[in-house]
Image: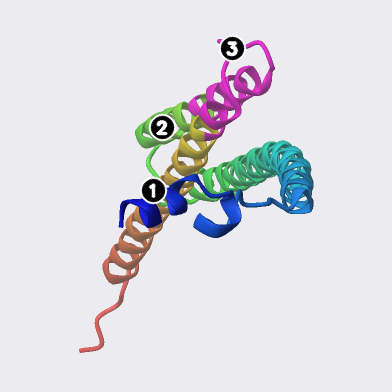
Amino acid sequence: MIVALSYLLLSPGRATAQGMPVYDNTNFISLAKQLVESAKQTAELLKMVEQLNAVREKIEKVNNAVRQYQAVRDITRNNEQLFEMVRDDLREVLNSPYIHGDEVETISNAFNGIMEHSLDQLDFMGQVLSNDFLNMTDAERLAILEAQREESQKILADIKHRKKRYDMVISFRKMQAIIKDRKPNF
């Protein structure tokens, strides 16, 4: 038994084991090639992501510029309507025979105050649009312009409301005059 065991242990490698494994170097080379190719693709994807981020930033800048333009356009349009309404409506109200002389100054001052406020808004808007005003970002500038647009719309609504009130006063006084000058039929 001892002889058989020693024969097995001392015999050459073929009898006891299958031998050293043989590795195929082509697998390692193809794996290395795949890793290099994958790294190239990843690098190109990163470049593409950077380019897309740059494009996105440019689109955001253009979008902010368009929004600023639209806000400025709306503010300008609102102020043009305001000037026309004040000019026409004030003339109509003041030329009415049913407005008393002492009311003319009060009405004129109210409309002039609104016009001065509107002109101040336009001056402020010009300062906001200049590039070096408080070193503002486009988003901050846009927020201010949006607030200006809302305020100009409120001013327009206020003028319309005042005109409506003055029209009602004129209509009421006209009706009073008609009733007062009416001749009885009995």
Question: Residue 106, how many percent across, how many down?
Answer: 37, 31
Q: Write the start and end of the magenta stretch as one range.
A: 117-142
Q: Which residue is mark 3?
A: 135
Of all residues, the one furthest to the bottom in this rendering is 186
Residue 173 versus residue 56: which sits nearer the camera? 56
Disc 1 to disc 2: CB gap under 8 Å:
yes
Query: Which of disc 3 and disc 2 is earlier in sequence?
Result: 2
Report the residue at 30% width, 77% height from top. Answer: 183
Amino acid type, label 3: Asn
Amino acid type, label 1: Arg
Which quadrant does the C terminus fall into? bottom left
Question: Residue 72, how many percent across, how many down?
Answer: 65, 38
Q: Left or right: 2 with respect to 154?
A: left
Question: Mark 2 falls on what kind of element?
Answer: helix
Residue 68, magenta (yes or no) = no
Residue 119, magenta (yes or no) = yes
Of all residues, the one furthest to the left in this rendering is 186
Query: Which of disc 2 and disc 1 is earlier in sequence?
Result: 2
Question: Mark 1 falls on what kind of element?
Answer: helix
Disc 2 to disc 3: CB gap under 8 Å:
no
Residue 76 versus residue 114: which sits nearer the camera? 76
Question: Mark 3 falls on what kind of element?
Answer: loop
The image shows residue 98, relative to residue 115, as above or below, that is below
Report the residue at 30% width, 58% height from top. Answer: 1
Q: Which residue is mark 2?
A: 110
Disc 1 to disc 3: CB gap under 8 Å:
no
Mark 1, other Cα within 10 Å: few <14 / some 14–19 / many ≥20: some
Query: Which of disc 3 and disc 1 is earlier in sequence?
Result: 3
Residue 86 versus residue 44: which sits nearer the camera? 44
Question: Residue 111, how many percent across, how many down?
Answer: 47, 34
Q: Which residue is mark 1?
A: 162
